[in-house]
Image (cartoon, rainbow, N blue to C red):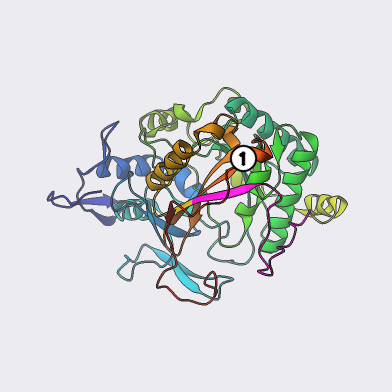
Amino acid sequence: MNPSKTPPQVLDVAGAEVSISSPDKVVFPEPGLTKLDLVRYYLAVADGALRGAGGRPMVLKRFPKGIGAEPFFQKRVPENHPNFIDTATLHYASGTSAEEAVIRNAAGLAWVVNLGCLDLNPHPVRAEDLEHPDELRVDLDPMPGVGWKQIVDVAYIVREVLDDVGLVGWPKTSGSRGLHILVRIAPQWSYRDVRLAAEALAREVENRAPDLATARWWKEERGESVFVDFNQNAKDRTVASAYSIRPLPDARVSTPLTWDEVASARPEDFTVPTVLKRFAAVGDPHSGIDDAAGKLDKLLAVAVELGPAEKAPPGRNGSGRRQSVMPLIEVARTKSKPEALAALGQWRARHADVVAALHPADILVDGMRGSSSLWYRVRVNLQHVPENQRPPQEELIADYDPWAGKEWPGRPGS
């Protein structure tokens, strides 16, 4: 979002004045959507967007330099926030705390978009009870090489497991490659219990469809499977909520679906223009989600039946860090994804003789959460390369340190 000389436009949103700076700044060049277009989109779908994000503390994921640059994550609400923005103070395991924004109305949606937020990233708790989540989140994250049909098949297995334990799942596209399934629960359990229940769900899905899904936390061990990401229920995690606009060139939207739609839907079908038409025609398929809160007792009983999850082998070098069972080499650590992909390209050119043996899921380009933004780690799993042909670990092509010059309690390496 480059600076613009266009004067602000003041909107009256249900009696609240919201100033939109640089309203005609083009945010999505491909469909030609401006900042004001995005504000108007969120106002049009406010009923559904607030059902997903309203009343919850949220991390502000801001794109001040546009969708082509990395965003930064702002936990603390700006000091000069308007009086229609509530706040809640969250305490993190690292020992830090943050007073985060809580939006409750359409004016709040317009305000966060004006800050440069595209998607909404709320915590799974209400501001009135910060220690007891009222939502369990199932994130179906496909590994490279996994097609949409496999994701859909896993989604229906998730639904089957939820049915068996008396819970209702509400599917939506993630706005990227995967699917989210939201499960409203009574706010009676701790984060630890909710994460344990989500892990049990993931393990049971893997047990029922081991060729399709995985609950393995370590990425290099998943193969070409759909990862049922239970760790999205950890206390510090957020996911893009319903009707969030994602930072992809086509202005794709994380869109609620009915279960009948899941098999035929495609993520690319749901963009800002198409969702505006869809919402006006059919409303929000998740309109009943708040009336379907269930209990975790049966899913926690599944956790007991399954027993403790397999633990990673300890490190053997005295560092206490996990030692992978896979033949991994690290290629680069970079500040941005384009730099990561460029480093990967250099490695491929350097080792062209082994590239043909690699499977799609052997290339691991991971966005890692830094102090306020993402950084990227590039690794290659050589499991499909004959042992005598595997290139050794080399000096990193790029070695970005996201923690350089920063100190705080719980800092990695401290």
Disc 1 secondary structure class:
strand
Residue 378 in the image: x percent, y percent? 50, 48
Quadrant in which residue 355 is drawn: top right
Structural crowding at the residue carrying mark 1, measured as other residues with C-alpha within 10 Å and reported as few (<14), some (14–19) or many (≥20): many
Write the start and end of the magenta stretch as one range. 310-331
Residue 175 in the image: x percent, y percent? 48, 38
At 54% from the left edge and 25% from the top edge, which residue is drawn?
265
Q: Which residue is mark 1?
A: 140
At 76% from the left edge and 33% from the top edge, which residue is drawn?
209
Quadrant in which residue 403 is drawn: bottom left
Q: Is residue 31 above or below residue 50?
A: above
Toward the viewer: 389 or 295?
Answer: 389
Q: Amino acid at mark 1?
A: Leu
Is residue 335 one of those drawn in magenta? Answer: no
Q: Main secondary structure of the magenta part?
A: loop
Quarter of the picture containing the C terminus is: bottom right
